[in-house]
Image (cartoon, helix red, strand yellow):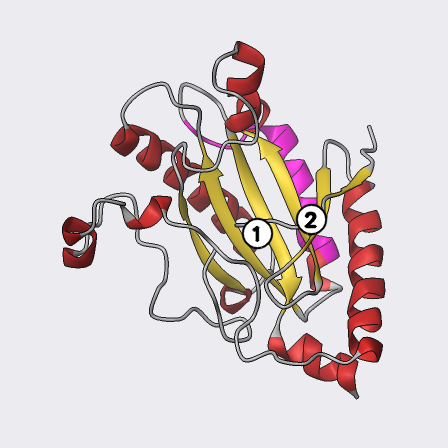
């Protein structure tokens, strides 16, 4: 079933990146803990995230419009995939970006944690679309509800994000385009965790799509 493209004004969501390369603040795996994390009461995975390429300043109206048109086209192509949920937002550079959400309950087998065939099919379609838009960078984050410990939830959400990344790269989306991935546990709820329906919405993997520096440079020409 086709899903409508929803528009939201802005999103506080990863970390700053250069083009489609990861900076030194790459999201750590579910089992890693840094000395900096130990010294800070807020674990790194729960700190605010920002989607957008670094080194991008004063994007001209012409370039902004060109990027917006490409993102609109990308959104329409993704929304046409069966089961896709797409939202547009404004990234840290004031440019249009997209969030593709995969519901965890429908996407992962609860017994094995592996991707269900329906999710694999959606990711196959998404990989095909992304290969037609090589200037678009990706960030992939898993999320849970608030049932259970933060560490268990970070591990689960991190494993789910990893499964999505592996699926996309296996189908030709180059790893250098995926600038960050990891588990966010229940740091970023999109609904109330006070109801079963809300908790189900919070169990998800978000794929953020945004313009990398090469795409911005090309749009400015």
At x 44%, y 29%, the residue is: 144
212 relative to 28 in the view: left or right: right
At x 27%, y 25%, the residue is: 149
Q: Secondary structure at mark 1?
A: helix
Q: Are marks 2 and 1 in contact (CB under 8 Å)?
A: yes
Q: Position of residue 157 (x, y in %)?
A: 40, 36
Mark 2 or 1 closer to N-term?
2
Residue designated by label 1: 168
Instruction: Kindly identify which numbered label has been placed on residue 126.
Output: 2
At x 61%, y 77%, the residue is: 213
Q: Does residue 109 lie above or below 88 as drawn?
A: above
Q: Does residue 60 lie above or below 30 as drawn?
A: below
Residue closer to the observer: 57 or 138? 57
Mark 1 Cα within 10 Å, few/some/many (few <14, many 20+)?
Answer: many
**Quarter of the rendering occupied by the N terminus:** top right
At x 35%, y 64%, the residue is: 25
**Quarter of the rendering occupied by the C terminus:** bottom right
Q: Secondary structure at mark 2?
A: helix
75 relative to 194 in the view: left or right: right
Image quarter for residue 162? top left
131 relative to 50 in the view: left or right: right
Q: Position of residue 125 (x, y in %)?
A: 72, 46
Q: Position of residue 69 (x, y in %)?
A: 85, 64
Q: Position of residue 180 (x, y in %)?
A: 45, 58
Q: Does residue 50 lie above or below 145 as drawn?
A: below
Residue stretch in magenta? 113-129
């Amino acid at each position: 079933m086709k899903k409508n493209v929803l528009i939201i004004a802005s999103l506080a969501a990863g970390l700053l990146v250069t083009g489609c390369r990861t900076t030194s603040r790459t999201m750590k795996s579910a089992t890693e803990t840094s000395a900096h994390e130990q010294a800070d009461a807020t674990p790194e995975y729960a700190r605010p995230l920002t989607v957008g390429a670094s080194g991008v300043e004063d994007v001209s109206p012409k370039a902004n419009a060109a990027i917006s048109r490409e993102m609109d086209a990308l959104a329409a192509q993704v929304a046409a995939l069966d089961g896709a949920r797409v939202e547009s937002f404004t990234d840290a550079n004031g440019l249009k970006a997209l969030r593709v959400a995969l519901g965890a309950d429908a996407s992962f087998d609860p017994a094995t944690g592996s991707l269900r065939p329906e999710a694999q099919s959606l990711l196959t379609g998404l990989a095909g679309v992304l290969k037609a838009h090589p200037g678009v960078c990706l960030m992939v984050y898993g999320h849970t509800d608030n049932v259970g410990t933060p560490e268990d939830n970070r591990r689960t959400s991190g494993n789910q994000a990893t499964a999505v990344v592996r699926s996309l790269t296996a189908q030709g989306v180059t790893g250098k385009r995926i600038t960050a991935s990891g588990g966010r546990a229940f740091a970023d709820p999109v609904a109330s965790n006070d109801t079963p329906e809300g908790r189900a919405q919070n169990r998800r993997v978000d794929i953020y799509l945004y313009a990398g520096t090469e795409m911005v440079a090309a749009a400015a020409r």
